[in-house]
Image (cartoon, rainbow, N blue to C red):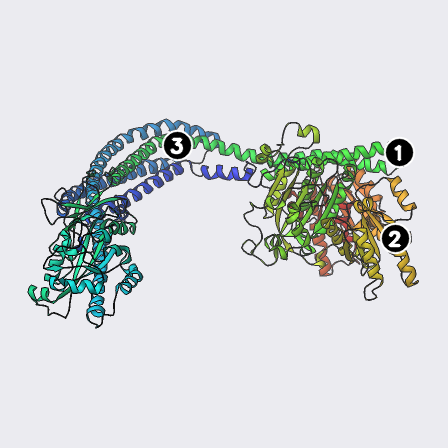
């Protein structure tokens, strides 16, 4: 399609009335504007800075820094602290500084910050108050001088202000010196405040960093301690189990297999233990009997420091040496099954654990050592098992004698710590070390590395693993060095930046006042010039409209009268060409004037009822000839959900569609199609199963693989993308009243497409895709710009999608009102009678393209004809046979075959089927009429088809109501052609025949044109050349039925003449009511404005002065009919 569009937005120009409004607003009071501007600036600064400094004071005066102003700064530390109770926070290490010291530092800084801020606040407040007082005095003095003067003429006032301007500027410069000194003091004070703020925030950041480290370390220590205690409790529970079921039962209820299965199933309770084993207490006297009962000998450890998780073969070990007591393993977990029969008393760490465990009655731990399988440091937890319950105060000797065995479990401490750290999101932020500090001179690093970067902070948390004889600690450091104190830097820098910006604003404002005073004088002059330009532009529009259209009215009128005379073929061709060229010129003039009205904000819309489908038929009829020449298929479809009658501006709505279709015709080469569709916007937003067939098939048209499901079979762009950027597309949120509806209109073509680089300037006035476009295709480049403005006036949006060498689709929305059938023009009933004669007929449409078949169905439904569709002639033959054999259905009246089907399949077969079926039924069935649907066809081809008797008639696309009605009536009336397309001229002649009409125009050519046009339809015409003559002719009583009056005439224009005529009619009406005079009929003849001025304000003035209608020059037959029909049809 044509260029001239992008999706939405303005054309980059403001209407003139908008520009004038801006100028006037700036000009209201030359001195007052300066005063108000400075007052507003200073008020904003005072309020903003007062709020800021007051909040800063409140924040600094509180001990815990909890004010709302800086409450979020606590989150700007290195890490967010955990929520711990105070007693959980341990003391800091010797390398750090105490929290109390930080608080003391903060308390020492706060008084300085408080008093410094107070001083700066009062300095700033004093600066503002003094500035306001002096400014008020200066401007009030100047205002008093201005208002005491009498209002001079414009030139004198300008000279006076220019004389006072140097004095005002000098006074303003003098008053700025003390203000600059106060500004300097303010900047120095704010620098001191900024340094105090920096120091405070830096100390606060250090405190919070240390507190964060302490909280994080204590949290990890607590979780490690709790996890170890949970595991220890499970081991203790296992010891109770062994005591109950092994020593408490006789015989024992537990063996190695039972112990192994139980420990395997309950291993999830002890996830950090690498193995659990039970060793029995055996004395030397019991050894022989024990070894016989067990079936193995007690083995000796090869190394005294090996643990429960050694990886060795017990069969290769030597028997244990003779000693007083043994502790052989009899039960163990499957993971350490290899240690069965090994004497734990021979291990160095194990022996110490056993002796301490049975003497204390508590779980005891070994010192850290490497576990052979994992090579990690670990500890062994040992519990003693007694043969009976001992009192809490039992002596060590009682506990040793009551001991029957020992339960041990090994712990991988590294795995335990890593598990804890994995549960915390910030595990990577600190470095954790766990130490065994039982021997303070030789601490053992149980977890972590000793190669740690000193980041300046260290926190130590104590660990209690349940063994009072062993001490453990957790050391925590931050992994990285602390970042720069951004909180302190940003806070101090922000305060300083704000103070500098405020100082700069005040300094600039002081210097600006002098220049603004001078600018006000210049703006006063510009205001007068702008007002004069606005008036001149309005006068220019009216003058250009009248002066150009008036001679064109004479040219077109005389050419029309010439064509009504007897001319030969060449003369008719010349006259028609000149007439068409004149219409084109009028069209260009109208577009330019429309653009001018849009820019001046004078374009307004009507609100009258109209038939949308009739308007689309007229648009289609306008471009039907060009489409046939290019063999382009042009089609229109309107959803059945769109109301039949709408209320809006039909002329502007038609103008939009005409522009879009005209561009499509212009930029579409031979073949292809142009498809205009209208739906409710709500239909587009509905699910696919709720859409009509055309909308749904259009949605899926790009998804067909074998053949494109489009109107002509050519590839198209995705029309849905043309409205995807619309802000409001249907829905209750965009329509306030139930009487309003939103339409979405799409114009789809298979033309050249728009280059990507031209998309941004499509809707720019007088702009086209490239310089060659206007030469190849013609046009002014403002059609789409006007269309966009009209769409926006209708409350809609417009957009497009285009692809080079594929085509374009333009879519727009418009908000209209629902209308009533009774509100339409009475002439609508002319076609209703002819349409009613076709209702109830039945038709069959044969078309291989479903969308095109739906378009045909739409037009036939408008005539009341029921429609069935098939995709091929073979399917049609089957349908016809079934239809004739079914008596319940109405007989088939007509068959419409698309040319594409006709060319590809034999049509004789279906006619033979019809003849055979009808002959079998008898004379009660009539042969259906067969119509051929063709995009273009020559006269010779039409004659050959008709003479072959294969078809009854040929319907040339584009389809429209008048063509279908005339063709069907001619076919079903056996050749009696009805002249439906000539009803209007005949009806116009009936309306005007014998009517006395007065034509008033000072231009002789225009009078001649109007007289000839009216006499053509039988009117009796009288012409006069002035307003005074018209008043004399229409002074009651008179015999005129109507008057066509020009508006712009010398001496007395049409407005004044009409007012005088209406005044005389009112006087006569009063006399008739009082009985002073008597007349058989009134003399209130309708007066119709006849002018070339198309400004909306002119139309309003016509109505105001008493005119009944408006006809713009050059008027045509349809305009003339519309103007007189409402006055003469009822007579």
Contact (Cβ within 8 Å) of mark 3 with mark 2: no
Residue beneath the point at 9% across and 59% down: 324
The image shows residue 675 at horizontal and vertical percentages of 70, 45
Graded by Cα atoms within 10 Å as few (under 14), some (14 to 19) or many (20 or more), the crowding at tag 1 reads few
Q: Is residue 1031 visible?
A: no
Q: Which residue is mark 3?
A: 516
Q: Which quarter of the figure is the C terminus placed in?
A: bottom right
Graded by Cα atoms within 10 Å as few (under 14), some (14 to 19) or many (20 or more), the crowding at tag 3 reads some
Q: Which quarter of the figure is the N terminus placed in?
A: top right
- What is the CA distance from the residue labelled 3 to the residue labelled 2? 90 Å
Q: Secondary structure at mark 2?
A: helix
Q: Which residue is mark 1?
A: 569
The image shows residue 857 at horizontal and vertical percentages of 75, 54
Graded by Cα atoms within 10 Å as few (under 14), some (14 to 19) or many (20 or more), the crowding at tag 2 reads some
Q: Which residue is mark 2?
A: 911
Q: Secondary structure at mark 1?
A: helix
The image shows residue 275 at horizontal and vertical percentages of 25, 56
Q: Determine the image quadrant of residue 716.
A: top right
Viewer-nearest residue: 56 or 1120: 56
Viewer-nearest residue: 37 or 210: 210
Foreground mark, 1 or 2, reads 2
Foreground mark, 3 or 1, reads 1
Viewer-nearest residue: 66 or 884: 884
Q: Determine the image quadrant of residue 386.
A: bottom left
């Amino acid at each position: 399609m044509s260029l001239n569009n992008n999706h939405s937005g303005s054309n980059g120009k403001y209407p003139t009335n908008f520009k004038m409004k801006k100028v006037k607003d700036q000009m209201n009071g030359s001195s007052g504007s300066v005063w108000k501007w400075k007052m507003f600036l200073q008020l904003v600064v005072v309020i903003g800075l007062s709020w800021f400094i007051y909040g800063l004071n409140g924040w600094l005066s509180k001990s815990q820094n909890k004010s709302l102003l800086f409450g979020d700064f606590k989150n700007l530390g290195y890490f967010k602290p955990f929520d711990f109770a105070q007693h959980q926070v341990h003391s800091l290490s010797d390398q750090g500084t105490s929290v109390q010291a930080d608080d003391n530092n903060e308390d020492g800084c706060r008084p300085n910050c408080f008093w410094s801020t107070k001083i700066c606040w009062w300095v700033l407040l004093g600066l503002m108050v003094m500035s306001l007082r002096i400014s008020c005095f200066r401007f009030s003095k100047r205002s008093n001088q201005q208002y005491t003067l009498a209002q001079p003429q414009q030139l004198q006032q300008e000279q006076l202000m220019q004389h006072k301007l140097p004095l005002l500027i000098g006074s303003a410069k003098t008053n700025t010196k003390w203000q600059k000194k106060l500004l300097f003091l303010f900047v120095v004070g704010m620098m001191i405040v900024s340094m105090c703020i920096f120091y405070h925030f830096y100390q606060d950041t250090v405190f919070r960093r240390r507190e964060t480290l302490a909280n994080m370390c204590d949290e990890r220590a607590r979780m490690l301690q709790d996890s170890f205690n949970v595991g220890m409790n499970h081991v203790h529970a296992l010891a109770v189990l062994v005591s109950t079921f092994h020593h408490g039962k006789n015989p024992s209820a537990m063996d190695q297999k039972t112990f192994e299965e139980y420990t395997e199933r309950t291993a999830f309770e002890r996830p950090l233990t690498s193995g659990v084993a039970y060793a029995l207490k055996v004395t030397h006297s019991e050894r022989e009997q024990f070894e016989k009962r067990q079936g193995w000998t007690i083995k000796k450890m090869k190394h005294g420091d090996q643990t429960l998780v050694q990886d060795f073969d017990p069969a290769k070990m030597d028997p244990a040496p003779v000693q007083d007591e043994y502790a052989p393993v009899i039960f163990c977990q499957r993971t350490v099954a290899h240690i069965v029969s090994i004497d734990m008393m021979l291990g160095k760490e194990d022996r110490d654990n056993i002796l301490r465990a049975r003497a204390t009655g508590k779980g005891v731990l070994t010192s850290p050592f490497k576990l052979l399988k994992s090579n990690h440091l670990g500890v062994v937890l040992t519990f003693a098992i007694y043969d009976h319950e001992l009192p809490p105060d039992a002596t060590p000797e009682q506990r040793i004698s009551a001991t029957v065995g020992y339960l041990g479990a090994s712990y991988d401490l590294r795995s335990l710590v890593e598990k804890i750290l994995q549960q915390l999101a910030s595990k990577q932020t600190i470095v954790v070390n766990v130490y065994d500090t039982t021997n303070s001179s030789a601490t053992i690093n149980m977890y972590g590395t000793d190669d740690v970067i000193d980041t300046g902070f260290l926190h130590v948390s104590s660990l209690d693993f349940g063994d009072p004889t062993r001490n453990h600690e957790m050391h925590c450091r931050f992994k990285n060095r602390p970042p720069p104190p951004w909180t302190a830097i940003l806070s101090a820098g922000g305060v300083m930046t704000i103070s500098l910006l405020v100082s700069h604003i005040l300094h600039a404002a002081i210097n600006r006042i002098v220049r603004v005073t001078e600018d006000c004088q210049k703006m006063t002059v510009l205001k007068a010039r702008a007002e004069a330009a606005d008036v001149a532009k309005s006068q220019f529009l009216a003058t250009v409209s009248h002066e150009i259209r008036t001679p064109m009215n004479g040219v077109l009128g005389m050419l029309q009268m010439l064509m009504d005379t007897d001319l030969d073929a060449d003369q008719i061709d010349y006259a028609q060409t000149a007439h068409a060229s004149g219409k084109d010129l009028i069209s260009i003039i109208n577009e330019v004037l429309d653009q001018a009205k849009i820019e001046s904000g004078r374009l307004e819309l009507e609100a009258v009822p109209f038939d949308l489908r009739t308007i689309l038929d007229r648009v289609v009829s306008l471009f039907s000839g060009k489409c046939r020449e290019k063999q382009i298929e042009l089609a229109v479809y309107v959803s059945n959900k769109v109301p039949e009658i709408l209320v809006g501006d039909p002329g502007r709505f038609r103008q939009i569609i005409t522009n879009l279709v005209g561009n499509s015709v212009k930029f579409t080469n031979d073949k292809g199609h142009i498809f205009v569709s209208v739906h409710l916007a709500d239909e587009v937003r509905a699910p696919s199963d709720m859409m009509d067939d055309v909308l749904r098939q259009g949605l899926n048209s790009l998804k067909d693989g074998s053949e494109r499901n489009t109107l002509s079979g050519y590839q198209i762009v995705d029309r849905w993308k043309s409205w995807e950027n619309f802000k409001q597309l249907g829905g209750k949120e965009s329509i306030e009243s139930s009487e309003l509806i939103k339409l979405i209109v799409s114009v789809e073509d298979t033309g050249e497409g728009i280059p990507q680089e031209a998309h941004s300037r499509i809707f720019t006035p007088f702009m086209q895709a490239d310089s060659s476009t206007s030469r190849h295709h013609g046009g002014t480049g403002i059609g789409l710009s006007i269309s966009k403005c009209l769409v926006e006036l209708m409350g809609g949006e417009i957009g497009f999608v285009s692809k080079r060498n594929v085509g374009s689709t333009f879519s727009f929305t418009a908000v209209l009102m629902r209308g009533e059938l009774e509100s339409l023009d009475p002439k609508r009933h002319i076609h209703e009678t002819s349409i009613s004669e076709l209702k109830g007929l039945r038709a069959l449409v044969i078309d291989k393209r479903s969308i095109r078949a739906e378009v045909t169905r739409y037009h036939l439904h408008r005539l009341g004809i029921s429609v069935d569709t098939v995709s091929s002639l073979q399917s049609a033959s089957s349908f016809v046979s079934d239809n004739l054999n079914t008596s319940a259905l109405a007989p088939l009246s007509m068959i419409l075959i698309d040319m594409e089907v006709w060319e590809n399949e034999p049509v004789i077969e279906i006619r033979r089927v019809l003849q055979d079926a009808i002959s079998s039924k008898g004379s009660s069935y009539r042969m259906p009429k067969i119509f051929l649907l063709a995009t273009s066809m020559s006269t010779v081809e039409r004659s050959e088809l008709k003479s072959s008797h294969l078809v009854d008639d040929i319907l040339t696309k584009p389809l429209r109501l008048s063509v279908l009605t005339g063709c069907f009536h001619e076919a079903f009336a056996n050749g009696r052609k009805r002249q439906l397309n000539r009803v209007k001229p005949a009806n116009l002649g009936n309306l005007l025949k014998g009517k006395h009409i007065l034509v008033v125009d000072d231009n002789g050519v225009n009078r001649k044109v109007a007289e000839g046009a009216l006499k053509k339809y039988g009117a009796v015409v009288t012409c006069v050349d002035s307003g005074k003559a018209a008043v004399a002719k229409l002074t009651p009583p008179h015999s005129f039925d109507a008057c066509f009056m020009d508006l712009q005439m010398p001496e007395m224009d049409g407005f004044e003449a009409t007012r005088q005529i209406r005044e005389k009619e009112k006087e006569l009406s009063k006399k008739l009511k009082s009985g002073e005079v008597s007349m058989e009929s009134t003399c209130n003849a309708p007066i119709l404005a006849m002018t070339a001025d198309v400004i909306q304000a002119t139309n309003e003035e016509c109505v105001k002065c008493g005119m009944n209608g408006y006809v713009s020059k050059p008027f045509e037959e349809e305009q003339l009919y519309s103007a007189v029909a409402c006055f003469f049809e009822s007579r």
